[in-house]
Amino acid sequence: MVNTHNHNGFFWNDPKTYNFYQDWRAARLNATESAKSDGFVEISDLSNPTDSEKSELIRRCRETNLALYQAPQKDSMRDDLRHDLRAFAGAFDLRIAEQHRSAGDQGIVALTETNAPSQAGYIPYSKRKMGWHTDGYYNAPDEQISAMVLHCAKPAEAGGENRVLDPAIAFIRLYDENPDYIQALTHPAAMVIPADGDQRPQSVGPVFYGDPETGALQMRYTARTRSIAWRDDALTREAVAFLRQTLEAPDPMTISLRFKAGQGVLTNNALHDRTGFDPNVLTKSMRVMYRVRFTNRVKGT
């Protein structure tokens, strides 16, 4: 059943909702354009955001699926920063989903360059560029990531910029180019991520799907070209090629920034990437980003 009262709901399979789509599209583009100049929400205490701070973060996530924030800087190696991030997540009723082997007992992963045996060779723990993706794209369909926090504890000396884009904008670009692209990318076998040895089983699912709790538009995507299989039909290949080109252009609604210590993003799993960093640092880079992933969306979005 199409939900024409929820601007986050699905609508593409009902021709009667064309006017609804146009209204939703205009509102989303206007909100995203404003978000590019809104800057950061100032958070006085990351572990206990005020009602007004929470309200503004929720508003931004509701309208554009992401909210940038600035909190007082803390030592990147202190456990209380992890505790603060857990409390911050709790303020939005977010359920920590991190079962990653690097998450520790707090359910928070430190993304930093390392040679640890369990992390060496994986791009998030290197200085290398990371392509466009949503987090947990390799998870099983019933274990998808609906929201996340990415928090900068210590920036790189050079590089390490991020680009972020609301998945709804990617949806709009695809739909406007060819509505059939959306049909292709909502197919239940649109994208296949092969099994990773004993670490992870094969993951098969759509690119766009409805959040199981709210029906809101969610996205599962990676720009990787290895260890991935797309559904073998012409329309899917065209849709994927168009999406990849749109993201790399980049889309004018993309937010580009280099996080400083204490800054981060609260998001309903928006598309994001990362440039390489510290190419001239001969020893290990000290850049530290904390990642927290959740099974549900930010409350009220």
Image: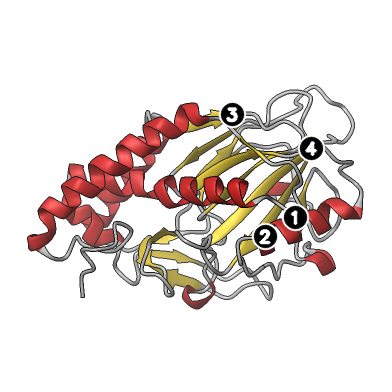
The circle on residue 257 is 3
Q: Nearer the viewer, residue 23 or 111?
A: 23
**Distance from label 1 to label 3 (Cα)?**
21 Å
**Distance from label 1 to label 4 (Cα)?**
12 Å
| Residue type highlighted by circle 3 | Leu
The percent coordinates of residue 68 (x first, y second) are 58, 39
| Residue type highlighted by circle 1 | Leu
The quadrant of the image that shows the C terminus is: bottom left
**Distance from label 3 to label 2 (Cα)?**
23 Å
In the image, is residue 128 above or below residue 86?
above
Labelled pair 1, 2 in contact (Cβ < 8 Å): yes
The percent coordinates of residue 79 (x first, y second) are 90, 55
SS under mark 4: loop
The residue lying at 53 percent from left, 60 percent from top is 298
The residue lying at 82 percent from left, 58 percent from top is 83
The residue lying at 76 percent from left, 27 percent from top is 278
Q: Nearer the viewer, residue 33 or 269?
A: 33
**Distance from label 3 to label 4 (Cα)?**
18 Å
The residue lying at 79 percent from left, 54 percent from top is 84
The circle on residue 89 is 2
**Distance from label 1 to label 2 (Cα)?**
6 Å
| Residue type highlighted by circle 4 | Pro
The residue pinned by badge 4 equals 72
1 or 4: tag closer to the N-terminus? 4
Visible residue check, residue 301: yes
The percent coordinates of residue 36 (x first, y second) are 46, 30
Labelled pair 2, 4 in contact (Cβ < 8 Å): no
Q: Nearer the viewer, residue 108 or 39?
A: 39
Q: Determine the image quadrant of residue 252.
A: top left
| Residue type highlighted by circle 2 | Ala
The circle on residue 85 is 1
Labelled pair 3, 2 in contact (Cβ < 8 Å): no
